[in-house]
Image: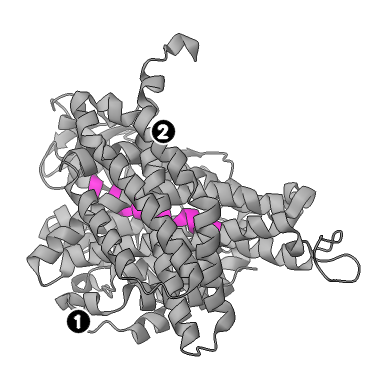
Amino acid sequence: MYRAPLKDLRFVLHELIGEAGLQACPAHADYSLDIADAVLEEAGKFAENVLDPLYKSGDRQGARWTPEGVIGAPGFKAAYQQYAEGGWASLRAPTEYGGQGVPTVLGTAVEELWAASNLAFKLCPMLTQGAIEALDHYGTEAQKAQYLPKMVSGEWTGTMNLTEPQAGSDLAAIRTRAQPAGDHYRLFGQKIFITYGDHDFTSNTIHMVLARIDGAPPGVRGISLFIVPKVLINADGTLGERNDLQCISIEHKLGIHGSPTCVMAYGQKEGAVGYLVGEANRGLEYMFVMMNAARLSVGLEGYAVAERAYQQAAEWGRTRVQGKPPGVVLAGPAPIAHHPDVKRMLLSMKSQIEAMRALTLYAAYQLDLGARHADESVRKAAQARGDLLIPVVKGCSTEVGIELTSLGIQVHGGMGFIEETGAAQPYRDVRITTIYEGTTAIQSNDFVGRKIARDQGAAVTALIADVRRELAELDATHAWVREARDLTVSAVEGLAEAAARIPPAFARGPEHALAISVPLLRLTGLVLGAWLLTRSAAIAAQRLAQGDTDRDFLQGKLVSARFYVHHVLPQASALAHTVRHGADSVLEAEVGAL
């Protein structure tokens, strides 16, 4: 049974981030930690009482394809109706279209609860949020007025249609075509891997579809973005006839069985009616708004699902009695959490989840400042930092998610391999997250290319300078904090040296940077995680010294930081070595030798 980790979410929002920066944003001037607590409290209840009970049944029964349309997993439709009626669909949406406009950082914290309690359910509103953002940025006023209020309320959902059978990551190969037809277009083609491309939750679904207008230039320069509603809308706003599109099958997957992954056919008859978004041939640029939002959302899924696995593994460790651990003064057999290696595995899960949670919320906070802060210089710097961190969050959190959910199975021993315990489902579910919205290599290529080489390392250098300053100013009176700080400072220097290699490597040829981009991405995530855990430990030590009675939780922060810098952070030196010396061994290897 999942329990929302509200105490740790509050710690990050209250202690690591605080409210001052958000209150300096005119749109969030009335933001307070009390408001954040109230939202999290209610979100936790919804996650625990509505979504979590459908977690296992959704996996076992799943969504179902029929010729008339996809039928959601049992209970999902009713849960979605409660979700919309409760105002959750509108939480982060623009206020001018009925949204609540809460800060991205608070919305991201809430998203963690949906992802951990029921990842298959969470994917539906995630895609709708991305479609809302794309329309809000690039839609006409008429398009916004027609679609956004119902999408914001949750009455309609949205999707993102990129992939085709021959065009996965290579979107230049898209063949779906759009024929001009007066004030609209007719689309013909097939899209695959469309999450919630069809379902029975709502009366309409608004598909955001990439296609090529007849006669458009080849490659990505000729791709346009279209609004293609499942059901056409009459002039008076009522729903009309069904558009010429259909889900012709759903995929049989390793996990997330409650989420229908659809094969969508457009234009099997006269052509699906679509409406151009923005200017022709700029569709990929517009779609990146959706993809950027989705990359942050998918990134948090990694540690969120790991949190669920950790909770189950920790409970198993506290209750499963096996053997007598050495050095433990107990009569007879003891719970396996007392065994040194089980304790090590649980600490590995706990510390890395806390590190990735802090990093993800910090990145979301930067996006808030970048979009809303009153000071233009703050906006510019924060947006650059948020953009820099999105691929780190997406790549590192999802890779960590796979590692930690696997550890969750290991804690269970042989029972973890048996479906009845439920230990395997988080592992199966989270496996897609390193692939969704671009693989880890796509994230790392973006990181070294667009985020480091393009500005000659300015954004990453500014971040490292701030990390160095904060570590130098840290109250390190407590021995464990001092220990964590010193080891983190050393790792930060290794990161600085590794990142500085990217611009000249890219100048020699992009392949010299891309060959070691994933190791650099992982190195960055590891070191930033250590920085945030060390800050957390310093705060916890101060509160304990002041007599704070929440001793177990605060002591846990010290334990997490100490474990992390000795068991997780040492990987940073190996990754730094790979960044320094590893490119040639990749580039000089002949494909025939693989």
Three-letter amino acid code at disc 2? Answer: Thr
Which residue is labeled 1 in the image? Answer: 29
The numbered disc on residue 578 is 2
* Secondary structure predominantly adopted by residues drawn in magenta: helix
Disc 2 is placed on an element classified as helix
Per the image, is 473 magenta? no
> Can residue 48 be seen here?
yes
Up-down relation of residue 126 to residue 576 (above or below): below
Q: Is residue 375 left or right of residue 38?
A: left
x and y percent of residue 192 in the render? 41, 36
Say which quarter of the image contains residue 489. Answer: bottom left
Bounds of the magenta segment: 288-306
x and y percent of residue 545 in the render? 48, 85
x and y percent of residue 434 in the render? 45, 43
Residue found 35% across the figure and 32% down from its top? 580
x and y percent of residue 111 in the render? 42, 65
Three-letter amino acid code at disc 1? Answer: Ala
